[in-house]
């Protein structure tokens, strides 16, 4: 989503009128989830996706009409709609897509774009609130500020704040009107404890999936080997005890320990295990992991707490090479994020 809004700003700065298409409802085996978006320029150039290719052409044509009329339109594609076969959506599901002009010269939408840029530049989250009729943007909630309709009740405000906190885009109703809360979530934070051969591939794959990585390793020789793959301000030639207490270790944060050095890994685990971090993975064989658990238990951590550690790290893929091991780690973090595994 960050890329889509950056591209929108770029197009509009060039004087290109732009429409925004967003999936606002899905059912059965739809190809994309609510919140998936693309932008369409008046020249029919598109960026992003609402269906993985099934309906983009039809949506783009409607978007140009929407720009010409200056009005929103709610489109439906599904097996119960004969138009679905024309656009190739025959996978047994369906989507509703809201197409609307998005004018950065409009006072509210210009303010929204600025708030979005300011929020996401600091890895914050923002929820855009849109009416599903022709009203367009009605407000937003971000980690920095709120702009909400004054006539909404306290209970209604709490309803939309709960959607923002949950971090999942969703439709909702207020009185007789329908709206969509479009969440641009915080980037998932990835803490890599240890710079090694696996770190190179893990950095590349994790960034492709939208993680914002940070590498911590007091061994300067190793951290120097990955310069250029990670922003300098997120590459720490320091001990975990010097860095981790300064970070927000919450459900948006994932950690992978790769050093094979108990002095470094154990120090990190002593800080990560009591935190609210979403995922902890530790490299090593089953014997190595068992010895790790014995040290942690001797230090006072209960088996219930140490059970949080995914060790040996990664999904079972029969991985052997650094790239394969990195793939298995990214796959396991994705499964945790999608709540496929705990």
Image (cartoon, helix red, strand yellow):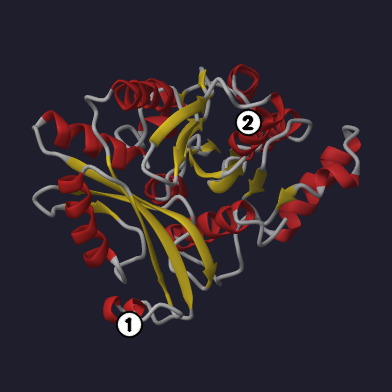
User: Which quarter of the rendering shows the N terminus?
Assistant: top left
In which quadrant will I find the C terminus?
bottom right
- Residue, x 58% and y 40% (percent of image)? 167
Find out whether the residues at labels 2 and 1 contact each other: C-beta distance under 8 Å.
no
Taking the image as shown, residue 47 lies to the left or right of residue 52, namely left
The residue that mark 1 highlights is: 85
Query: Which secondary structure, mark 2?
Result: helix
Q: Residue at x 62, y 40 (%)?
A: 175
Q: Mark 1 or mark 2, which is nearer the start of the sequence?
A: 1
Tell me if residue 237 comes above or below residue 17 in the rendering: above
Question: Tag 1: Cα neighbours inside 10 Å, few (<14), some, or many (≥20)?
Answer: some
Which residue is drawn at the image coordinates 27% and 37% (left, top)?
102
Percent position (x, y) of residue 245? Answer: 65, 19
Name the residue: 61% across, 68% down.
316
Quadrant in which residue 2 is drawn: top left
The front one of 42 and 331 is 42
Q: Position of residue 16 (x, y in %)?
A: 11, 38
The span from disc 2 to disc 1 (Cα, nearest Å) is 38 Å
The residue under label 2 is: 161
Comparing 338 with 184, the one in front is 184
Q: Is residue 292 visible?
A: yes
| SS type, badge 1 | helix
Q: Which mark is residue 310?
A: none
**x, y (%) of residue 14?**
9, 32
* Front-lying residue, 15 or 48: 15
Residue 123 vertical placement versus 315 (above, below): above
């Amino acid at each position: 989503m960050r890329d889509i809004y950056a591209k929108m700003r770029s197009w509009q700065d060039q004087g290109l009128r732009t429409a925004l298409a967003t999936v606002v409802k899905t059912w059965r085996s739809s190809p994309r989830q609510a919140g998936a978006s693309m932008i369409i320029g008046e020249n029919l150039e598109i960026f992003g996706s609402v269906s993985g290719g099934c309906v983009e052409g039809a949506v783009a044509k409607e978007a140009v009409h929407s720009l010409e009329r200056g009005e929103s339109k709610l489109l439906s594609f599904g097996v119960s709609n004969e138009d679905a076969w024309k656009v190739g959506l025959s996978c047994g599901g369906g989507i509703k897509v809201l197409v609307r002009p998005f004018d950065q010269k409009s006072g509210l939408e210009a303010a929204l774009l600025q708030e979005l840029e300011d929020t996401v530049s600091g890895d914050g989250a923002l929820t855009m609130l849109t009416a599903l009729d022709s009203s367009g943007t009605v407000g937003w909630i971000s980690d920095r500020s709120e702009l909400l309709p004054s006539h909404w009740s306290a209970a209604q405000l709490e309803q939309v704040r709960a959607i923002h906190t949950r971090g999942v885009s969703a439709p909702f109703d207020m009185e007789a009107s329908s709206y969509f809360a479009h969440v641009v979530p915080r980037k998932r934070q990835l803490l890599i404890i240890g710079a090694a051969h696996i770190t190179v591939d893990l950095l590349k794959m994790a960034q492709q999936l939208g993680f914002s990585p940070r590498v911590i390793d007091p061994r300067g020789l190793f951290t120097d080997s990955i310069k250029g793959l990670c922003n300098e301000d997120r590459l720490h030639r320091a001990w975990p005890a010097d860095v981790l207490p300064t970070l927000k270790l919450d459900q948006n944060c994932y950690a992978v320990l790769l050093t094979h050095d108990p002095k470094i890994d154990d120090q990190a685990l002593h800080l990560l295990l009591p935190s609210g971090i979403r995922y902890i993975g530790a490299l090593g064989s089953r014997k190595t992991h068992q010895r790790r658990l014995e040290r942690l238990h001797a230090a006072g951590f209960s088996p219930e707490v140490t059970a949080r550690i995914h060790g040996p790290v990664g999904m079972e893929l029969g991985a052997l090479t650094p790239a394969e091991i990195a793939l298995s780690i990214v796959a396991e973090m994705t499964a945790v994020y999608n709540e496929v595994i705990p």
